[in-house]
Amino acid sequence: MSNTAQQQQHTAQILPTERVQALNTLIKATQSLINLADREAQALAQNDMVGFHIMQDEKQYLTQRYERLSVEFRARIEEFRGSDRGLLDRLEKLQILLGERTKNNSDVVVNIRDRAQQKTQNSLLTVQELAQQKSVRFGAHTGQV
């Protein structure tokens, strides 16, 4: 794809012009990210790092789309002030839920990373202790050092 085509793709409006459709699009995009966060949480709980890793491409796509929708929404915020209060409330609640789910998943990932670093550190210390307790001689059986 040429640079011009990529720029047009990134600048093309993806949020529908009609307000109700636009809000429903944002709601669906938010729900898609929540569903993905739930699947990630399940993979993390089952220690399925391969499954978790596979989801990252989907997350990147959904996140980029959500960000573009959000930018367009903020640029048109005045249009949405008089919109259906129920849709706006639903969108707000979903955004709060998305924030909670992603924070929980981030906390789990940090804990996994910290445990892995601690295990690595403990292994290195154990190896160092063993090396200090046992002298290692290369070629001791053949008379070579």
Image: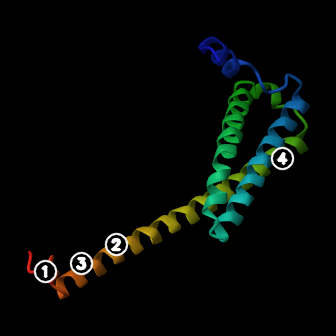
| Residue at numbered disc 4 | 89
Q: CA distance from mark 4 to mark 1?
A: 80 Å
Residue farthest bottom in this picture:
133
Mark 4 or 3, nearer chain start = 4
Mark 4, secondary structure of its residue:
helix
Residue farthest top in this picture:
4
| Residue at numbered disc 2 | 121
Count the marks: how many? Answer: 4
Between 136 and 75, the one lying in front of the other is: 136
Tag in front: 3 or 1: 1
Tag in front: 4 or 2: 2
- Quarter of the image where one finds residue 141: bottom left
Note whether 48 is above or below 85 in the view shown. below
Q: What is the crowding at mark 2: few (fewer than 14 residues within 10 Å), some, or many (at least 20)?
A: few
Task: Answer whether residue 92 is visible to the viewer in this image.
Answer: no
Are the residues tagged 3 and 1 within 8 Å (C-beta)? no
- For badge 3, the amino acid type reads Gln
Q: CA distance from mark 1 to mark 2?
A: 35 Å
Residue 128 tag number:
3
Mark 3, secondary structure of its residue:
helix
- For badge 1, the amino acid type reads Thr
Q: CA distance from mark 3 to mark 2?
A: 11 Å
Tag in front: 3 or 2: 3
Mark 4 or 2, nearer chain start = 4
Residue 124 location (% of width, % of height): 31, 74
| Residue at numbered disc 1 | 142
